Image (spheres, rainbow, N blue to C red):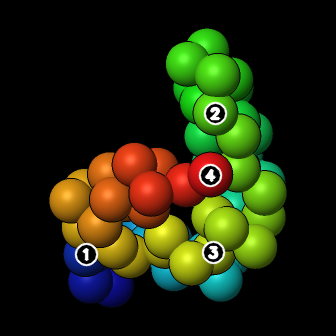
Amino acid sequence: MKVFGKKSLLIFDLDGLLCNTEDVYLEGWKQGLDQIGLSIDRCQLSTLSGQSPRAIDAFFINKD
């Protein structure tokens, strides 16, 4: 009998297929922005997904 030792597995869920973290991020954005008097909804957050920090800054600077 061959022994291969203990196996370990680590799964990275970077695209949200295994665990939907969008609601967690939305709540985090809402709490952080609330502290500085700004707000964001789910649609606005989805437009910011994957954007650079500079693009996100520009979004809030130009927001009414």
Which comes sooner in the sequence, label 2 or label 3?
A: 2
Dot 1 and dot 4 residues touching (CB under 8 Å): no
Q: Is mark 2 on a helix, strand or loop?
A: loop
Within-10-Å neighbours for mark 4: few <14, some 14–19, many 20+: few
Q: Please state the horizontal and vertical placement of residue 22, each as a whole percent of the image.
A: 70, 62
**Residue at left 34%, top 73%?**
51
Task: Find residue 24 and report its horizontal and vertical position in percent.
Answer: 71, 46
Q: In this view, does 38 lie above or below 63?
A: above
Q: Which mark is residue 64?
A: 4
Nearer-the-camera pick, 13 or 52: 52
Image quadrant assignment for residue 9:
bottom left
Residue 43 vertical position relative to residue 54 in the rendered view, above or below: below
| Alpha carbons under labels 1 and 4: distance apart | 61 Å
Label 4 – label 3 distance at C-alpha: 18 Å
Per the image, the residue denoted by label 1 is 4
Q: How crowded is mark 1: few (under 14 residues within 10 Å), some or many (20 or more)?
A: few
Which residue type carries mark 2? Leu
Of all residues, the one furthest to the top in this rendering is 35
Q: Residue 53: in sight, yes or no?
A: yes
Residue on which the image places disc 2: 38
SS for dot 3: helix
Q: Which of marks 1 and 2 is nearer the N terminus?
A: 1
**Spatial CA span between label 2 and label 3:** 17 Å
Counting from the top left corner in percent of width and height, residue 43 is at 75, 73
Q: Between disc 1 and disc 3, whose residue precedes?
A: 1
